[in-house]
Image (cartoon, rainbow, N blue to C red):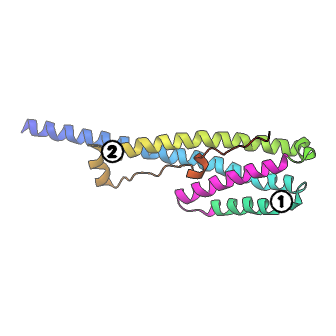
Amino acid sequence: MTSSLVTVAILAAAGIWIYNRLVRDRNQVRNAWSDIDVQLMRRHDLVPQLVSAVKAYADYEKATFSAVTELRTRSEAASNLPEKAALEDAMEAGLHRLIAVAEDYPDLQADENFRQLSTGLTEVEDHLQYARRFYNGAVRMLNTRVESFPHLLIARWLGFKTAEFFEVEADARVTPKVELDE
């Protein structure tokens, strides 16, 4: 009888310990996503200002301006992670095009407001990259626990699910081909 109680107590303690680890990991994923969300909001706040600054110098680039603005709007409305990640990758590429347009205008390059916006965007992109790595590490830890024994027994029973990674689109992984004029 005593050994049965000890066994039940050990199993209960192990179950509580596993449950608490799963909760901690799930909360870490939520916290990491919150960090990404903050950086995305900072980026989204910079977009209209940057578009306005460049627009004053390059009116003929309206397609780039409207594409970046539309991607910002669609990303803010995105409801699932893969869709949001794809839109954010496209917006990042659009912002790089916008900066490339700005490089054709020395007066714009010299504009203090533009330089501050450009520096702010670079900082946001760096923070976003760090936040993405942290988030994906937290997702990896949660997913490993949810999918491995004995955690998976409790995870399935209590409805814990794997989380989705915030991945870069396949096109963004390809190194661009650069041809030098000779």
Residue on which the image places disc 2 = 19
Amino acid type assigned to the residue bearing label 1 in the image: Glu
For residue 89: magenta? yes
Image coordinates of residue 164 in percent, x first then y, are 47, 52
Badge 2 density bin: few <14, some 14–19, many ≥20, Cα 10 Å: some
Q: Which residue is most to the front?
A: 182
Distance of mark 1 from mark 2, alpha carbons?
54 Å
**Residue 125, image x, y percentages:** 67, 43
Locate residue 67, reporting x and y percent: 73, 62
Return the residue found at the far right. 107
At 77% from the left and 63% from the top, the residue drawn is 66
Q: What element does badge 1 sit on?
A: helix
The front one of 6 and 161 is 161
Label 2, secondary structure: give it. Answer: helix
In depth, the one of 7 and 138 nearer the eye is: 138
Q: How many marks?
A: 2
Name the residue located 69 percent from the left edge and 52 percent from the top edge: 93
Residue at position x 59%, y 38% in the image = 130
Q: Is residue 110 magenta?
A: no
Q: Most prominent secondary structure in the magenta stretch?
A: helix
The span shown in magenta is 76-103
| Label 1 sits on residue | 61
Q: Is residue 124 above or below residue 86?
A: above
Whether residue 10 is visible, yes or no, is yes
Residue 99 falls left or right of residue 7: right
Image height check: is 44 above or below 118?
A: below
Q: Residues within 10 Å of mark 1 (few under 14, many from 20)?
A: few
Q: Is residue 46 visible?
A: no
Task: Name which of mark 1 and mark 2 comes first in the sequence.
Answer: 2
Residue at 91%, 44% (x, y): give it: 106
